[in-house]
Amino acid sequence: MLRGTVTEFDEARGLGTVTALDGSPFLFHVIEIADGSRTIDVGQPVVFQPLPKFGTFQAGHVAKL
């Protein structure tokens, strides 16, 4: 698991970006929010699992801290 911060989230599209502590961006889809909610605040600290998807790594299992 990596730590990071939600730096973008578009509730209408259900897509966002988590920026890891090392500055690496990871895209995520709303279904990856671990608590089952359909929204997450920009600036929210999170932990996440980098998952290989579509030829890159995306954030999976995004859990609020």
Image: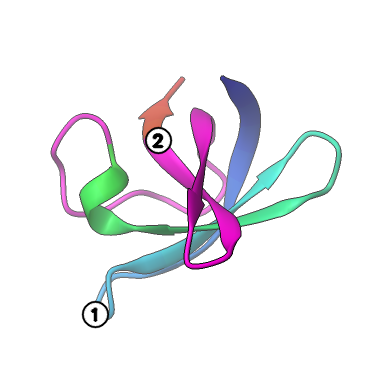
Query: Is residue 11 rendered to the left or right of residue 9?
Result: left
52 drawn magenta: yes
Q: In the rendered image, which residue does mark 1 sit on?
A: 12
Mark 2 vs 1: CB contact within 8 A: no
The percent position of residue 5, horizontal first and vertical second, equals 61, 41
Q: In terms of secondary structure, where does tag 1 sit?
A: loop
Tell me the residue at 40%/35% (across/down): 62
Q: Which residues are magenta?
A: 34-61
Query: Is residue 31 rendered to the left or right of residue 26?
Result: left
Label at residue 29: none
On screen, residue 12 above or below 9: below
Task: Indicate the amino acid at tag 2.
Answer: Val
Q: Where, quadrant-wise, is the N terminus in this rendering?
A: top right
On screen, residue 15 above or below 46: below
Q: In the rendered image, which residue does mark 2 sit on?
A: 62
Q: In terms of secondary structure, where does tag 2 sit?
A: strand
The percent position of residue 60, horizontal first and vertical second, equals 41, 40
The percent position of residue 37, horizontal first and vertical second, equals 15, 43
